[in-house]
Each structure stands twice: as C-alpha cells, then as structure tokens.
Amino acid sequence: MFLLKLVAIYVFSILVAITINALLYVECYRKSKDGVYPTSLHDIFYRRE
C-alpha cells in the first residue's frame, strides 16, 4: 500500500511539473517579440529583457 502511495505521489509531481513547464512555455512564447522558442526552463528564467 505504501509503495502504491509513493508511485501516485511521484506520477502526480511529474504531471504538475509538465503542466507548469507548458504554461511557462506558452507565456514566454506569447511575450517574445521575435518568436524565438525557449528550449528549456533555464532559457525562460534567464532570457528576461
């Protein structure tokens, strides 16, 4: 039972991470004027102008 709970938490955290990543990606893409796609979260956070 404990293992099942552990797997559920693991899967849930992955889904949350993917969702946040996707939202940030879309937000950054809408804000960028030149239309350059950010390759990762690192680019999104460090390419602020």
Image (tube, rainbow, N blue to C red):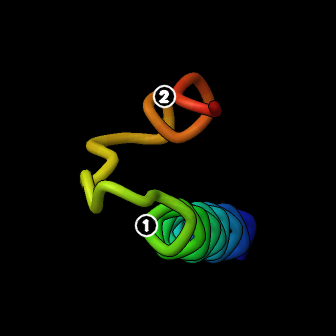
- For the image, the number of numbered tags is 2
Q: Earlier in the sequence, mark 1 or mark 2?
A: 1
| Residue 44, placed above or below residue 34 | above
Can residue 3 be spotted in the picture? no
**Relative horizontal placement of residue 41, taking residue 45 as reference (left or right):** left
Identified at 33% across, 47% down, the residue is 38
Camera-nearest residue between 33 and 39: 33
Residue 19 rendering spot, x and y as whole percentages: 57, 76
Q: Which SS class for mark 1?
A: helix
Q: Amino acid at mark 1?
A: Tyr
Location of residue 11 by image quarter: bottom right
Label at residue 14: none
| Residue 8, placed above or below residue 35 | below
Can residue 5 be spotted in the picture? yes
Identified at 57% across, 23% down, the residue is 46
Residue 15 rendering spot, x and y as whole percentages: 55, 75
* Quadrant of the snapshot with the N terminus: bottom right
Q: Which residue is mark 1?
A: 29
Label at residue 42: 2
Q: Residues within 10 Å of mark 1 (few under 14, many from 20)?
A: some
**CB atoms of marks 1 and 2 within 8 Å:** no
Camera-nearest residue between 1 and 41: 41
**Relative horizontal placement of residue 45, taking residue 5 as reference (left or right):** left
Residue 44 rendering spot, x and y as whole percentages: 52, 41
| Residue 44, placed above or below residue 18 | above
**Relative horizontal placement of residue 7, taking residue 2 as reference (left or right):** left
* Quadrant of the snapshot with the C terminus: top right
Q: Amino acid at mark 2?
A: His
Q: Residues within 10 Å of mark 2 (few under 14, many from 20)?
A: few
